[in-house]
Image: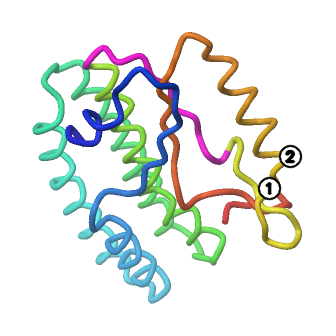
Amino acid sequence: MKQVAQLIQDDQRKVVVLSAMSGMTNTLTEIVNALYKGEKDAVHSIVDDLEKTYAGHVEELCTENETKDKVLEMLEGHWSHILSFTLDMFTPFEERTLLAQGELISTQMMQFYLEEKGVRSALLPALDFMRFDQQGEPDMWYVKSNLERMIKEHADVDLFITQGYICRNHFGDLE
């Protein structure tokens, strides 16, 4: 993340699309498979490992305790959300939501890191502007109008962070 942050900082206005950190999507897929099999203990074990791994990432990434606390609190929310899927039936809709967690985590971590470093940036949630039409193609009017509106709300910012991989379909469901 530190290297990416250095690469994206210049004086040009841009939207940077980030994916999940290396290995995260594979780990989330393991969780999905365990949930479909009803292996709740396996899910808890995998999430415990993720917590430890990401705590190490936070220590490496952040220098200020306030930022560390913000990131760890954000992560705890994601871990709790993932574990909530062990409480009820697991469906393909929940699968898409669970798999999106990697992108949501990485972009939020990057935004907190940039804030700590004093970089003026804004997080633009892809789910607020990315949508497919009925044919499964990007709904360009929807994307353009919502993205323009969101960027206009941050007139003093030149660096925008958003997620790749995740969007909504024409019904508004997560894809």
Q: Badge 1 is on which residue? A: 172
Residue 50, placed above or below residue 121: below
Disc 1 residue crowd, few under 14, some 14–19, many 20+, Cα 10 Å: few
Residue toward you, 135 or 97: 135
Q: Secondary structure at mark 1?
A: loop
123 in magenta: yes
Q: Is residue 92 left or right of residue 31?
A: right
Q: Residue at x 20, y 38 (%)?
A: 2
Between marks 1 and 2 in the image, the one whose residue lies nearer the viewer: 2
Q: Hey, what amino acid is under mark 1?
A: Gly
Which quadrant holds residue 113? top left
From what the image shows, is residue 103 above or below residue 151?
below
Q: At label 2, which amino acid type do we have?
A: Trp
Query: Residue 7, image x and y in percent?
Result: 29, 38
Closer to us: 42 or 21: 21
Residue 87 location, x and y as percent? 51, 67
Residue 141, numbered label: 2
Region in magenta: 117-127
Q: For this rendering, which residue is in front, 127 or 160?
A: 160
| Quarter the C terminus occupies | bottom right
